[in-house]
Amino acid sequence: MSEIEPAKAELRLCRRLGLSGEEALQFLTAMREGKSSRSAVVLSPLAPLDYRLPFACVDTSGWGWLPPRVYVPAEGERPTVYPDYREGMYYSLDLSSCWESAPLSVVPAPSCSLDLCAAPGGKTMLMAARYLPQNHIANEVNSSRRGILRQNIQQCSLPNVEVTGLRPDQWASDGRTFDLLLADAPCSGQSLLCKGIKNPGCLGQQMVNGNAKRQKGILLAAVQCVNPGGHLLYSTCTYDPDENEKVMAYLLRRVPGWHAVEVPLLADFRSGLADFPCYRLLPAHGFGAGGFCCLLQKDY
Ligand SMILES: C[S@@+](CC[C@H](N)C(=O)[O-])C[C@H]1O[C@@H](n2cnc3c(N)ncnc32)[C@H](O)[C@@H]1O
């Protein structure tokens, strides 16, 4: 299909997401204004239990899905300007990225885990905050991004984390298997628009199709690396159903012995575009630019 002009592509995306009326207007406004970015911080193992952040935070007591040791800076605060940040007491990341890790609330502490697409390290930090992982591998195929990943892990002193750089197909033939695998996949990054970051072509079908193909390849390799009863958490920072619900539906059809897992804390975010549990965050929810997540479990 040939590419279409941005305004038409936005409307087409609204239709495909099932948004109409006020919801569609909110979504279009968010994409055009680019002001939906929200940051968060996750405490590192260096921060003691009684650690106090050097800046004011939002009251998040009603946000049941918020992962442990995650805080949301108050408006106008800049968490990265403090010495504590440079000393690795906390790591700064997108609030939506924290939301994408909420399915781990139903996953028991893994004895070995793999973050397949790990740089710059946000999901690995969130895992460390939740489980203090034993035998965690943070893997990144891109060598310069792997350097940043390694630096972030060192700065925050994450224990028992090995950094590797294998491709997903190399992991599949490597033979090692894990209780938990994170596939925070490369995607068209449509949510960047809602953060005010230019991302030409991200609404076009060509870019979406290319990413969907890559995501399926990554997942077909990833499923081979999970132990019976183990979990795979898939996430993206894009809106298109072709990179989200449809990728999950493809995998569940193609690979027997897997099912999608319900996440009670994300009930309000359940996607209406699939007949299995998976979750989407939109800018209108107020927790950042948005994303998608789906937790799969391999049968015993
Ligand atoms: C969305 S980012 C990961 C963000 C990271 N999980 C975090 O929370 O900080 C996706 C990553 O996948 C990597 N990547 C790109 N192509 C890949 C492929 N074919 N297989 C595995 N990883 C890939 C990119 O280099 C990028 O670092």
Image (spheres, grey):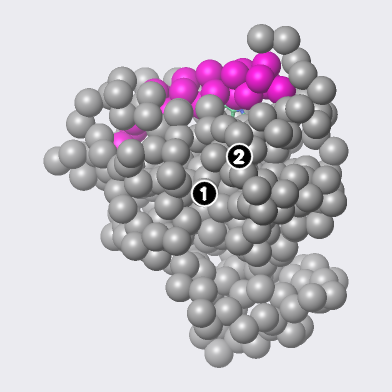
Instruction: Indicate yes or no whether the magenta region holds residue 135.
Output: no
**Ligand 1 within 8 angstroms of badge 2 C-beta:** no
In the displayed structure, 271 sits above or below 6; it is: below
In the displayed structure, 211 sits above or below 158; it is: above
What residue is drawn where x is 56% and y is 53%? 281
What residue is drawn where x is 54% and y is 59%? 99
Residue 179 % position (x, y): 30, 46
Span highlighted in magenta in the image = 204-227
The residues tagged by marks 2 and 1 sit, at their Cα atoms, a distance apart of 8 Å
Foreground of the two, 262 or 83: 262
Residue 113 % position (x, y): 39, 47
Foreground of the two, 131 or 137: 131
Q: Which amino acid does label 2 sit on?
A: Tyr
Q: Is the magenta stretch mostly helix, strand or loop?
A: helix
Q: How many labels does the image show?
A: 2
**Disc 2 to disc 1: CB gap under 8 Å:** yes
Label located before the other in sequence (2 or 1): 2
